Amino acid sequence: MSNSVKNIMIVGVGGQGTLLASKLLGYVLMQQGYDVKVSEVHGMSQRGGSVVTYVRFGDKVYSPVIDKGEADYILSFEKLEALRWIEYLKIGGQIITNTHKVDHNAHVMHHHLMNRVATASREYASDHNNANVSSEAYWKNRVNALLQRLD
């Protein structure tokens, strides 16, 4: 084993397996006799948001966090995430990235939600075709019912 600590960042979006990959890598490195620290940040990962994990290993690792300019390697599961985290790569470091681009979450969620609203609106209007669906009072009284159908 060398005396230096190696820093690996694994980045992607929610659902791509970045957390699993970091846990597996950490386990393998521990089996090789290294001191290993694994840390994860996955705020909006359930919504397809950014996920980053830090894997640090060496003879003795004191902190699980990798600062800007310290990553020896960045393993990116999505190319825009590679760009988001590039400033963490140290000079001489290596980046490995999947060239697949995941659609922006807001764009995907907007279209998904609009499709659900349109479908629910059509169903609701057809259920109530005798009502004056253009009146403001009609919709104010029925917004909650429409939103409940989206669940």
Image (cartoon, grey):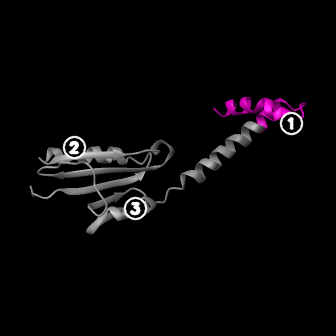
Residue, x 87% and y 32% (percent of image)?
Answer: 129
The first of marks 2 and 3 along the sequence is 2
Residue 61 place in picture, x, y as percent: 17, 49
Q: Are marks 2 and 3 in contact (CB under 8 Å)?
A: no
Determine whether the residue tagged by mark 2 lies in a helix, strand or loop. helix
**Identity, as a three-letter code, of the amino acid under mark 1:** Val
Quadrant containing the N terminus is bottom left
**Residue behind mark 2:** 27
Q: Specify the quadrant of the image occupied by residue 45.
A: top left
Magenta span main SS = helix
**Alpha carbon separation for disc pair 3 and 1:** 48 Å
**Identity, as a three-letter code, of the amino acid under mark 2:** Tyr
Please, is residue 16 above or below residue 150 in the view? Answer: below
Residue, x 54% and y 51% (percent of image)?
Answer: 105
Region in magenta: 122-151
Is 145 covered by the magenta stretch?
yes
Determine whether the residue tagged by mark 3 lies in a helix, strand or loop. helix
Crowd band around label 3 with a 10 angstrom C-alpha radius: few (<14), some (14–19), many (20+): many
**Residue behind mark 1:** 133
Crowd band around label 1 with a 10 angstrom C-alpha radius: few (<14), some (14–19), many (20+): some
Residue 39 place in picture, x, y as percent: 29, 45
**Alpha carbon separation for disc pair 2 and 3:** 24 Å
Q: Are marks 3 and 1 in contact (CB under 8 Å)?
A: no
In the image, is 27 to the left or to the right of 3?
A: right
**Residue behind mark 3:** 82
